Image (cartoon, rainbow, N blue to C red):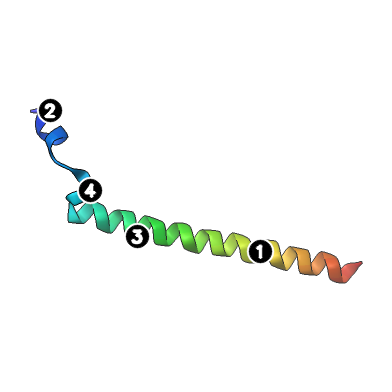
Amino acid sequence: MAGRDRDRDPALDPRQRQLRSRNLAVLAVLGALALLFYVITIVKMGGAG
């Protein structure tokens, strides 16, 4: 029974592809938000000095 899961290629599963693309989208949004916070912090520090 365990061999059945190993024979199936997860890259071909449409649900796995959908989950992976959703995870990558969330990662991109989080990365953009972190970059935005970083830029805002740098701008505020530069303006205070």
Q: Does 3 appear above or below 27? A: above
Q: Are marks 3 and 4 in contact (CB under 8 Å)?
A: no
- Which residue type does callout 3 highlight? Arg
Q: CA distance from mark 2 to mark 4?
A: 18 Å
Marking on residue 37: 1
Q: CA distance from mark 2 to mark 1?
A: 46 Å
Q: Helix, strand or loop at disc 2?
A: helix
In the image, which is nearer the foreground, mark 1 or mark 4? 4
**Left or right: 45 in relation to 10:** right
Q: Are marks 2 and 1 in contact (CB under 8 Å)?
A: no
Which residue in the rendered view is the most extreme toward the top?
A: 2
Q: Are marks 1 and 3 in contact (CB under 8 Å)?
A: no
- Which residue type does callout 2 highlight? Ala
Q: Nearer the N terminus, badge 2 or badge 1? A: 2
Q: Helix, strand or loop at disc 4?
A: helix
In the image, which is nearer the foreground, mark 2 or mark 4? 4
The structure residue drawn at horizontal position 17% and vertical position 43%, both measured from the top left corner, is: 9
Marking on residue 22: 3
Q: CA distance from mark 3 to mark 4?
A: 15 Å
Give the residue at mark 4.
Answer: 11
Q: Nearer the N terminus, badge 2 or badge 4? A: 2
Q: Quadrant of residue 32?
A: bottom right
Q: Nearer the N terminus, badge 2 or badge 3? A: 2
Q: CA distance from mark 2 to mark 3?
A: 28 Å
Q: Residues within 10 Å of mark 4 (few under 14, many from 20)?
A: few
Give the residue at mark 2.
Answer: 2
Q: Quadrant of the N terminus?
A: top left
- Which residue type does callout 4 highlight? Ala
